Image (spheres, grey):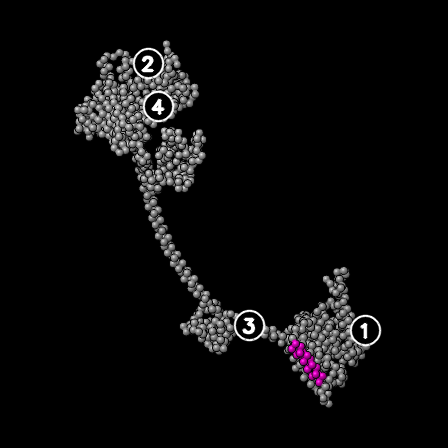
Amino acid sequence: MRLGNWDFKSFKYPWVLKEIAIFAGLAAIYFLTGKLSLRLAFYYVSATPIWPPTGIALAAFLFLGYRIWPAIFLGAFLVNVTTSGSIPACLGVAAGNTLEGLLGAYLVTRYAAGRFAFEQPRNIVFFALLAGVGSTMISATIGTASLFFGGSLPLENYAQTWLTWWLGDMAGAFTITPLIILWVENPRIEWNARKFLEAAFLSISLSLVAMIVFCGFFPSPVKNYPLEFLCVPFVLWGAFRFGRRGAATITLLLFAIALSGTLQGFGPFVRHSFNESLLLLQGFIGFVAVTSLVVAALVALREIAEEARLHLSNIVKSSEEAIIGTTLEAIVISWNKGAERIYGYTASEMVGHSLNAIVPKDRYHEVLWNMNRMAHGEALVQFETKRVRKDGVEIDVAATISPIIDDKKNVIGASTIVRDITERKKLEAQRIAQAQALEQSNIQLARREKIMRSLLEDLQASKNKLEEQKRSLQEANQRLESLSKLKDEFVSTASHELRTPLTAIREGISLIHDRVLGPINDEQYEFLSAVDENIDRLTELINNILDLAKIEAGRLVLSRKKVALEDLIRSSVESCKTLAGKRELRVEIDKVPEVFVDSNRVLQVLWNLFSNAIKFTDEVKGQIIFKLEKGEDGFVTVSVRDNGVGIAKEDLPKLFKKFSQVGEKMFHGTGLGLALCKEIVQLHHGDIWAVTDTDRGSEFKLTLPVYSTDFVLQESFAEHLDMAKRIGRQTIGVIAFNASKFIPGRPEDSAASRSKRLEQMADFFRKNVYPSDTVLTIDSEWILVLGIIETQGIVPMIQRLSLALEDWTETLADKPAAFSNDFGFSMYPQDGGDIRNLFETAKNSIHKSGKGHV
Amino acid sequence: MSKKYKILLVDDEPGILKMVTKRLEFEGYDVACAVDGEEALKKIKTEDPDLIILDIMLPKMDGYEVCRRFKEDSSHRKVPVILFTAMVQQKNKQMGFQCGADAYVCKPFRTHELLGKIKELLPKEGG
């Protein structure tokens, strides 16, 4: 902290110094003022009719606190000791002066707001009574007592001296304390030129009048007219126009002039002695001082109140909202700018008139009702209604109406604050309309959703029903399946059980017949041969029953392949050679395409026809001709012709029926052989029939289908459909694999080696799919897998195949780089019901995506 | 004199066992018999046959299982097995071959068929 060039920080006790300065200064001021005013001590040296130090002391205590008492005491002591009297008497006087100030400050602080005493008229009066009239008695009493006991105040002068002392101190307190406090409190002067001019004019006018009244300027022989009242207006002027500071200052000015005039023997207060004159003056000045201060304080309060009122009224005036004051009879009292703006009526048009001007006719009752409410002291908040503007347009408003209640709690009117909410209402209406539209569409949606839900429920119900049906169908299927399995098992068990004793019979007969057990005669041998033959027939019968049972149970599954029929015929002829004995066997074979058949079953058929031919032909002259030729479209024809007894035309229809024997029973047939042949050929979609001529023997003909991609596809697909139906499944997967990368493409590779590789791959596939799945090779580069599988199972299956294939290709010398993308698939029935299309779809699923399904 | 081959004949049917034994002995073979699967496995070890004729439907252990176990044992692996059964379906045959059987003869059999297979499977004399 710096004060001038003095650096307090470098000094050890700066506050002590400051305190000393304050104390010394205060003591000096007190001393000098005291000395000056003692000049006016006419009656007694130590008691002067005006004693400003009292005012200084009081102000100092109020501002600086009680702690400065030593300065006051010192100042007072010095004043007295340098004037007259003994030191003890002077100490007593000083103590009186100090106590007076302390008590005054205490009382003012306690009861009159301390240094803010001059803000309220009440506090000013209290100040005057407590500090001015009350505490000053202390000083007067102690002071005169000190002097009296010091011997310097004679008893006869005591009362007069006490009074002078008291009134002098009082005058000091009345004039000096307010002056100091008010000016120290607010030393700033914010006047404009006019105000300064006014202040100057006031000072001069007052001075003139005061001089006329108190200084004998009045050109009249009479010097002591009681004209002091002439000064009052000027003091009031100061109080009104310049506030408390002005009042205090003017009072002091007046006092100064009056004092000097009175001392010179002029003015209304001049009496026999100076002292008496001064006492009167003091009374006058004290009265003026208090009055002017009170007036100034009242003015200040009024100004503050006025300012607040003005502020409030400005708020009302400048409010954007309409603020309308009415009586309880709805007569307009006030009408602000906001109201003018909203309603179009000016204040002059409305004030004094009924509010009904702005109320739609159908709402008059509303105003009555509202005012009735106001009369009961109830407010209305954000009351929304309609009003009419001056131009006749109806507007929406929100009004808050409150009763106006006076100090006596009477309702004297209503204040209405109005906001124009027409725009808001419009928006609201829009919003409501939108909300309604939304609501409407929500309702519609909800209705639709309900419909959808009930549809879904229906669907679910029918789905459940279907599921149930499916389940019961599946159960039925399972029952059928188990029934047919049971039948199958029964037949095979029966067959086994029949064969076992037959084996013993045959071996027993055979042991005798072959003379293992000892010699037998020729007749015995012959009969045993017949028995053996019958055992053969019985065995064959059992075999045929088993096969037919299987076919009827639908359990005879052909395992068909591409076969050269020529090879089958040759091998069958070869195996029959022993049985044929001396009969002539001839084979006539045309070049025919390969067929799609189950080799074992076809051999069975050929064997049957062949053994029949042998049975019905002569052992020596017999001639059997096998013929292979092209048949109808897509078929090849096999014929077995003999020169035997032939078959009567009428017997032909019975030929292929079970257990029907043709002719004269001179030859043994099983009665089941041809029936079985027919079943087998028909399973192949071929046909079998007999052409007969009793003179030239008989000819059996059968057709078998030529191998073609299309046929194979159709057949395999039909098989799977059938199988799926039997086991209660709906979907069939078709996997197409493009094997071209595996097929050697070099020119030197023969077609045979390519097809061999393709078949090799197909075999690999067969090992890696379910036994019931079918693997086909198509168009010399495709491998097709057909399987009964769910949609979600097909991709894993392809992945499995792909992985297996990868392992497999590791073993190949010329393994292709990448092939996993060469898989495609399609599903029945999702992708169609025709296998050709399904195959195409599966193929396309590779090409389309470029990546296949894996 | 050429070596006499020993054949182990396994069948649970006493009549068949008796008659086939008669036939085989007549044909000049030594014959050992067993009536169930477990006995068959024991006899294989004790009798050390040159060929086994094995029924499938056997008590205790079926012929497939006997065949499989027998063929798993490296010391006997080369001894031929003829399955000899009344189960004539294709699948039975396939299963038999999968178990390591060398031939399959269906009952009721023709004597020459069985004898032919035996001759075929036994090591050639002096070979």
**A351, above or below A851, in the image:** below
* Residue A4 image offset from top left, x and y in percent: 74, 65
Disc 3 vs disc 1: which is toward the camera?
A: 3
Q: What element carries label 2?
A: loop
Q: Give the range drawn in magenta.
A: A193-212
Circle 1 packing at 10 Å, graded few (<14), some (14-19), many (20+), is: some
Q: Classify residue A1 as left or right of residue A514.
A: right
Q: Main secondary structure of the magenta part?
A: helix
Front in this rendered view, residue B7 or A837: A837
Residue under the point 65% across and 82% down? A233
User: Which label is found at residue A385?
Assistant: none
Closer to the N terminus: mark 3 or mark 1? 1
Q: How far apart are marks 2 and 3 (CA)?
A: 145 Å
Q: Does the magenta stretch include residue A196?
A: yes
* Residue with the mark numbered 3: A314
Asked whether the residues under marks 4 and 3 belong to the same chain, the reply is no
Q: Are marks 4 and 1 in contact (CB under 8 Å)?
A: no
Residue A512 locus on image (x, y percent): 27, 15
Give residue B27's mark.
Answer: 2
Give the mark nearest the N terminus, 2 or 4: 2
SS type, badge 1: helix
